[in-house]
Amino acid sequence: MKPINVGLLGIGTVGGGTHAVLTRNQEEITRRAGRPIHIVAVADRHVERARELVGADVKVTDDAFSLVDDPNIDIIVELIGGYTTALDLVLRAIDNGKHVVTANKALLAVHGNEIFAAAQKKGVMVAFEAAVAGGIPIIKALREGLSANRIQWLAGIINGTTNFILSEMRDKGLSFTSVLHEAQRLGYAEADPTFDIEGIDAAHKATLMASIAFGIPVQFDKAHVEGINKLDAIDIGYAEQLGYRIKLLGIAKRQANGVELRVHPTLVPSKRLIANVEGAMNAVLVWGDAVGATLYYGKGAGAEPTASAVIADLVDVTRLATADPKNRVPHLAFQPDQLSDLPVLPMSEVETAAYLRMRALDKPGVLADVTRILADLNISIDAMIQKEPAEGEDQADVVLLTHVAREKDINAAIHKIEALESIHGKVTRIRMEALNG
Ligand code: HSE
């Protein structure tokens, strides 16, 4: 059968992995897809390096637009990243009637609605399994495997860099800054780690999962985003004493009046499987009303794990290319005219339990003042620890765990507690999730 022709935009880590796995497993992939999948052209800034990787039979150029305009190419694989040139290339490929496979979560989280609408109009597919959690087939699971369910919530460790840093901080009792420097030295963290450590990368991925889980347009601008860059190692220790681990979670949760969409460091009970996902691994926990809890675990980055997802999309597109567009799996799981206007809730309306750490003067009545503030705002205390002041000091750390409360009430409580004369400095707040249904 006639091969399907692929044009690869970018042959860096993931592009190289995609070429290697497609070549190595060619025979089995063809048996699965029903026809051979051939990379016939590659565009990359480093033409010589690209040529060495793919050999003489594949066209190599530094002009990516020549690939999206090439009538001989059926599918464009976009692995360039970023929001600017990648957007132009993807829209032009779609306009030229080509299917697109991309690993670009930033592009889809920000411009996905425009891209999916253009693809819908042209009757082409935009597949993006590699954009969320690397090699874990979470898009497929949410969009197809769980399609019987009303999905209630999902929570994921969807950034390997930050999970590696958190694991090292906990294991070795080191500060965020020293672990980050070590991770950069070893090549685990990017030279510019902003997107990872500030939670932006995780929020891109959470945005995509929320859309597929709830059938809403992509709305990255409404996500609440907090990274791990301000996290103090002392809180990891206190959380552990209370039976919790701190993880950077991407959370999407259905409420009666809207959807919570947020990324922040989160206390998770140590006994949950997801709390024990260590190092650079990823995991996503999804709760559906019929199936209950399901957990997906694997490598969220790297050449061949991500290539595994890119090639699965290539196989899907190859199999489905001849199907009537109306009968294909919709981009955001729900039929485009059935997307819901369920709003993403403002953070003030979100409900979570909280970990609060404060530095309190060790004298009578201080705790009474703090607990009165919480009681007045209807915030109930779940647990508390108070450390003895260090030798020669008159202040001690007090750590409180609250029951579930509304974010705006916790904010008000923090504000009032910080205003007490007997409380020194800021209150550290880390949200908590029980993740048990
Ligand atoms: N930078 C991401 C991570 C991998 O650290 O998980 C690519 O999404």
Image: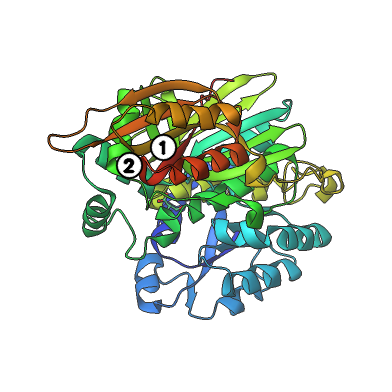
Crowding around mark 2 (Cα neighbors within 10 Å: few <14, some 14 to 19, many 20+) is many
Crowding around mark 1 (Cα neighbors within 10 Å: few <14, some 14 to 19, many 20+) is many
- Where residue 111 appears, x then y in whole percent? 67, 63
In the foreground, 410 or 377: 377
In the foreground, 416 or 169: 416
Q: Residue at x 61, y 26 (%)?
A: 287
Q: Is residue 24 visible?
A: no
Q: Position of 426 compared to 394: left or right?
A: right
Circles 1, 2 touching at the beta carbon (< 8 Å): yes
Mark found first going from the N terminus, 1 or 2: 2
Location of residue 113 with respect to 161 vertically, above or below = below
Q: Position of 178 compared to 276: left or right?
A: left
Amino acid bearing label 2 = Leu
In the foreground, 111 or 2: 111
Which residue is labeled 2 in the image?
166
Location of residue 18 with respect to 388 vertically, above or below = below
Amino acid bearing label 1 = Lys
Location of residue 343 with respect to 17 vertically, above or below = above
Q: Residue at x 78, y 59 (%)?
A: 117
Q: Residue at x 68, y 58 (%)?
A: 112
* Secondary structure type for disc 2: helix
Q: Residue furthest right?
A: 337
Q: Position of 283 compared to 318: left or right?
A: left
Picture quarter containing residue 366? top left
Q: Is residue 327 visible?
A: yes
What label sits on residue 247 in the rendered view?
Answer: 1
- Labels in figure, total: 2
